[in-house]
Amino acid sequence: MKKALLGLGLLLLVALAILLLVGPAATESAFNRVVPAQGAPPSEKARALHRQLLIADLHADSLLWGRDLLERGTRGHADIPRLIEGNVAVQAFTVVTKTPRGLNIERNEATSDTVIWLALAERWPPRAWTQLTERALYQARRLERMAAISSGKLVLLRTAADLSDYLERRRRNPAVVAGVLGIEGAHALDGDVKNLDRLFDAGFRMMSPTHFFDNEFAGASSGVDKGGLTKLGNEMVRRMEAKRMLVDLAHASPQTIIDVLAMATRPVVVSHTGVQGTCNNRRNLSDAELRGIARTGGVIGIGFWPTAACGSDARAVARAMRYAANLVGVEHVALGSDFDGAVTMPFDAAGLVALTDALLAEGFTEAEIAAMMGGNTLRVLREILP
């Protein structure tokens, strides 16, 4: 018996050693893929227009994977060199603090936690092993450290004044990216609304009530009960608006969306989504939900991955953007890539010109493309940031 237990212990130690050595890289390589290039390369017209754009993307989970984002990666979708190459001006870096086993868009319980394995493999501090608020704060500190040693290539936005200063600087030097911190799911508050103050002070300016499962604050589109805002959730939304944090309705249940829109006094966003009009599934937004978000003055970040677009190329993304624009107006459509979100992409951040090309092919004008590729998001950030 002792020999068997000893053997099991050694096996677990070996498994942990392998996880620590190769786990994050192998895991990301498996999940964050890019499909091979399809069709003709982007036209010269698209390339010329793309160079002139101020691009803003509302969603990337790049901080989860432990990569140095100042270095050009050989895996995944986004880092500072590739964002610069893709002419991205503003990138929302959204942190993930918990995901369940067997992740799906239909029904997930909150009883399991797969992020713990990445936390161990990437040597996150012990407090982040069990506390979700600490996981968010740790990822924020990583981005802040990267900005501090980036020689000015990465700056963080906390206020509207920061955004104005950055855009003035970028006119002189486009080889710089601004980051905005967001959070996937209010479970990152560890059940305590007061933790919102800690996260705000750490630089977070956007948060969704839910991710893939229901929590103490709200129901998720892929949760078990899929309910609306709870009493705590109502308090959280009020506090977020008072602090001028963006309320993000990505992953929210239909009832949560109804509840948030009923109390919203500022523009609401959806950081990454598809539309049921071109890709009908539970994860994507209905026409009524699109109209409701637009009525707040907010924007809808259209995602690039297959569940959002029902396709694996830039044309599928452009079709979703066309549908949303026809329904609620170009001024409410934005980018919500979900780069590095454990999804397969039609291109990485460096290849974003493919979408500009697809939008031209979809019949959008250059002014409309400029609005959707970044202008609309920048308008909302100017209005909401403190």
Image: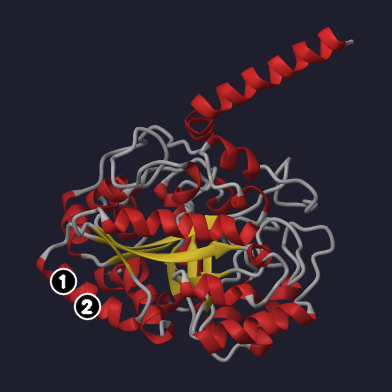
Q: Which mark is residue 244?
A: none
Identify the residue shown where x is 52% and y is 39%: 123
Amino acid on which disc 2 is placed: Asp
Q: Marks 1 and 2: CB-CB under 8 Å?
A: yes
Say which of 185 and 314 sits in front: 185
Quick one: label 1, few (<14), some, or many (20+) residues within 10 Å? Answer: few
Residue 342 lies in quadrant: top right
Left or right: 148 in relation to 345: left
Q: Is residue 214 visible?
A: yes
Q: Quadrant of the C terminus?
A: bottom left
According to the picture, the residue beneath numbered tag 1 turns out to be 169
The crowd level at tag 2 (other Cα within 10 Å; few <14, some 14-19, many 20+) is few
Percent x, y of residue 166: 23, 72
- 3D distance between C-alphas at marks 1 and 2: 6 Å
Q: Residue 58, image x and y in percent?
A: 44, 64
Of 32 and 304, nearer the camera is: 32
Q: Position of residue 184 (x, y in %)?
A: 58, 61
Q: Amino acid at mark 1?
A: Arg
Q: Residue furthest left?
A: 172
- Residue for point 49% across, 52% down: 61
- The circle on residue 165 is 2
Residue 202: percent from left, percent from top: 46, 69
If the image is split into quadrants, where does the N terminus sit? top right
Q: Please indicate, yes or no, whether residue 290 appears anywhere in the rendered image.
A: no
Residue at the far right: name it: 1
